[in-house]
Each structure stands twice: as structure tokens, then as C-alpha cells.
Image (tube, helix red, strand yellow):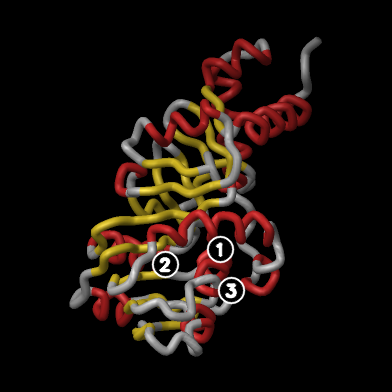
Amino acid sequence: MIMLKEERQQEILKIINSEQKVIASDLSHRLSVSEDTIRRDLKDLDNKGLIRRVHSGALRLGPPLEDFSIREKVFSDIKMSLAQKALPFIKDDQVLLIDGGTTNLCLTKQLPINLKATVITNSPPIAVALANHKQIEVIMLGGTLNKKSMINVGIDTVEALSTMRVDIYIMGIYNIDSQIGVSCPTLSECLTKRKMVSISSEIIALVTSDKLGTVSNQVVCPPQDLSYLITDSISSEIKNLYSRQNITVID
């Protein structure tokens, strides 16, 4: 049966949401239409902000960017589990860089009260969460406050980072794909994260599985820049996609 354009595009969306990414040539066989038709469909869906078109096909977009207070309540049990998996990597006398994100805030709240460390952050909620940790020196990065994400970003933030070196960067993740890498919605945060990557010996990403295989507008770094990817239960196939990038995957 021949599908109408709207029906075909809805079917494409279903496939992308289920499989995370699609190849144009494969879709043309599955939907019995030409590759040119598929490419036009993918372009339409990209223009509507429903997918992200790439060279050979398309990727699923990540979850919409909600206000920090709303995101804090989503997947709270999973975020707690991810934080527990990250704790063994954190030891006394380290210099830690923890940027924004509700999963990172969850981790910060679970840090041992007697931990001796230096924590650099551009997240006011994370800095406040460390107020009672007497043996943690907190360095708060200045900049322009992004109220939706509750982080400081901008030229002042990047310049402050230029004088620093850190042992572990715990990166907040909006979107990550095994080929494209880590991405985020805004240029200002992307530039800040890129600088954070450049000054870090190791990088840990705590990622709820709904963000895997998704992409946003600004690419922060390739996947192989990550040292560890900590996530919830995923298939061996998806795990291997990241393991092949020399990332240690913990799920």
C-alpha cells in the first residue's frame, strides 16, 4: 500500500524513536520509495525540529530542554543509581570539575561529608550543595547565568578555566551519539564545555539512557574524549558502540 507523505513521515519518526538513527538507503527499501523521497522527508522533519539530519540519514533528537527544577524530578531513581556508580572514582586530594546538570547535582549531594578535595563548578546549585562539606574547597566559576540550565557560561567562564588543570571532569550531558559525540543546544555552553574538556585528565559522563544516540546543534567533543560512560541498563549492541570508541562503559 502506498503511504501518503504525512503517513510516511510519521512512520519514519516511529522508526527513529525506536532505533535511534536511520540510514536513507535502508528507509527507502523499508518504505518502498526512492532515496530522493526519503531525503526530502528527512529534510522536512529536520526543518520542523523533529529529527537531526546527517550525511547518510538522520538521528533522534534528545529530550527537550526543560527548566532545571522540572528536570530535577525526572528519572530521580536512575540518577541516584548513576551517582552511586560514579562515587568509587572520586578520592581524596583530587581536583574535580563538575559542571551543570541534575544528575551531577545528585552525585554532588552523595559525596562523602569527609571528602578532601577541590571542586570547580559553574553551577550555583552544585556550589550550594557543597556548603556543609568542610574539607572541600569550592571554586565557583563566574559568567552569565543561564537560568534554564542554572549554569554560568560565557567568555569570563572560559577565561577562568584557562588557568586550571583538573584530575576528573564530571560532564553534564544533554545529548551523546557514538559517532558524532557529545553535543548541546547552545553555543555558549558548548564553548564552555570544550574548554573544560581541554583542561581535564579524565572525563566521566553520567548519562540516562534516553540521551544515548541523540544529537543537538553544537558538538562539544568526539566520543573518544570520554574516559568513562556511566549509564543505566542498555543492550550489549549499544554498549559496544561506545566501547569501540575506547570508552569504559559502566551500566
Within 10 Å of disc 2 (Cα), the crowding (few <14, some 14-19, many 20+) is: many
* Furthest-front residue in this view: 114
Q: Amino acid at mark 2?
A: Glu
Of label 1 and label 2, which has the lower sequence position? Answer: 1
Of label 2 and label 3, which has the lower sequence position? Answer: 3
The image shows residue 164, relative to residue 248, as above or below, that is: below
Q: Visible in this render: residue 138?
A: no
Quarter residue 93 falls in = bottom left
* Furthest-left residue in this view: 163
Element marked by disc 2:
helix
Within 10 Å of disc 3 (Cα), the crowding (few <14, some 14-19, many 20+) is: few
The residue that label 3 is drawn on is: 148
Q: Is residue 235 left or right of residue 135?
A: right
Q: Position of residue 78 (x, y in %)?
A: 64, 54
Element marked by disc 1:
helix
Closer to us: 136 or 185 = 136
Quarter residue 37 falls in = top right
Q: Amino acid at mark 1?
A: Thr
Residue 103: give its label: 1
The image shows residue 76, relative to residue 249, as above or below, that is: below
Q: Residue at x 59, y 23 (%)?
A: 38
Q: Residue at x 53, y 60 (%)?
A: 83
Give me the C-alpha separation between circle 3 and circle 1.
15 Å
Residue 189: give its label: 2
